[in-house]
Amino acid sequence: MNMNTKRDRVALSKGLLESERFADVEAKRSEITLEEQNPDAVGWVIEWIYTGELTPPALYKEDTAYETCAEMFKVADYFLLPELRQLLLEHMRNLLCKKAIEWQRAYQDFPREKPRSQYLDWDDVHGVFRGVEVAYRLGLGDLTQMWLDFIRATLYFPLVSAEFNHVLDAAPSFAVDVLRQTVRQNKTLMIELYRVAESCACCGENPLDREGGHFVTMGYGGGQCNRCALKLVLFGGDREIDDEFADLP
Ligand SMILES: [Zn+2]
């Protein structure tokens, strides 16, 4: 494989030429100029074609995982590689499920005497910042939707975080989408942001004490856990967007 990053020219490997997009041009050319494709991401995709595995270490590091996923996703789209697309979406979803639970816990465990706006620090937010920015800049609808599912699964607590506000600044369209989503779901959002349930109103347990456990809703009743309420979309459920009023007594 021969790559000239300066000119974004990639000598395409035989494997890449086997993708659908190149089926027609294969006979004519062995080298193609890839305008607007990230050369690193093209290299990672070629690796996937050969190994069938998601190999780049950047995909597994908190700081770089989400943006790497987005860059590869764009290349997978370009080359019409549905299997890779699916793999990347699953990888992303697994990461964000863990992250949502982590951020629920951070909110619940944050000392009450400190300002709530400090409950996430920059190290927590940095990777998300880059991931959201890239997904929106590249216009990757499946990923931007997943970020919205993620924010919903965090129960919108990050909106009170000063650091998380940098994410909204970096991707204004994301800010608008989040606002739209909150309005459609729950008009009392701003009140609930300052409520922290410590147990599920149905079973009385704290789901954050269980492996993989998390809250699905927060509300006047205190909140419902993932055993007692319908699954969130991020966690593979199909919880509809307008159903949250049903949780309010
Ligand atoms: Zn419960």
Image (tube, rainbow, N blue to C red):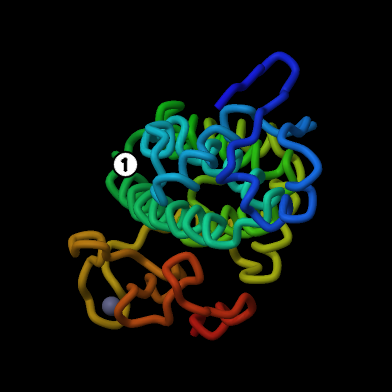
Q: Left or right of 201: which side holds 69?
A: right
Q: Would residue 160 be visible to someone looking at this image?
A: no
Residue at (72%, 50%) from the top-left corner?
22
Identify which residue is drawn at 40% across, 46% down: 51
Q: Is residue 46 above or below residue 80?
A: above
| Towards the viewer: 240 or 220 | 240
Q: Tag 1, which secondary structure?
A: loop
Indicate the position of residue 74 as horizontal and vertical percent values. Answer: 66, 45
Residue at image x 73%, y 54%? 21
Residue 125 as seen in the image, left or right of residue 40: left
Quick one: quadrant of the N terminus? top right
Tell me where residue 48 appears, x and y as whole percent: 47, 45
Residue 17 drawn at (x, y percent): 65, 46
Residue bearing the label numbered 1: 110
Q: Which amino acid type corresponds to the residue marked 1 in the rendered image?
A: Phe
Residue positioned most to the front: 27
Residue 143 seen in the figure: yes
Ligand 1, image quadrant it occupies: bottom left
Foreground residue among 81 and 167: 81
Q: Nearer the viewer, residue 13 or 92?
A: 13
The answer to which quarter of the image holds residue 106 is: top left
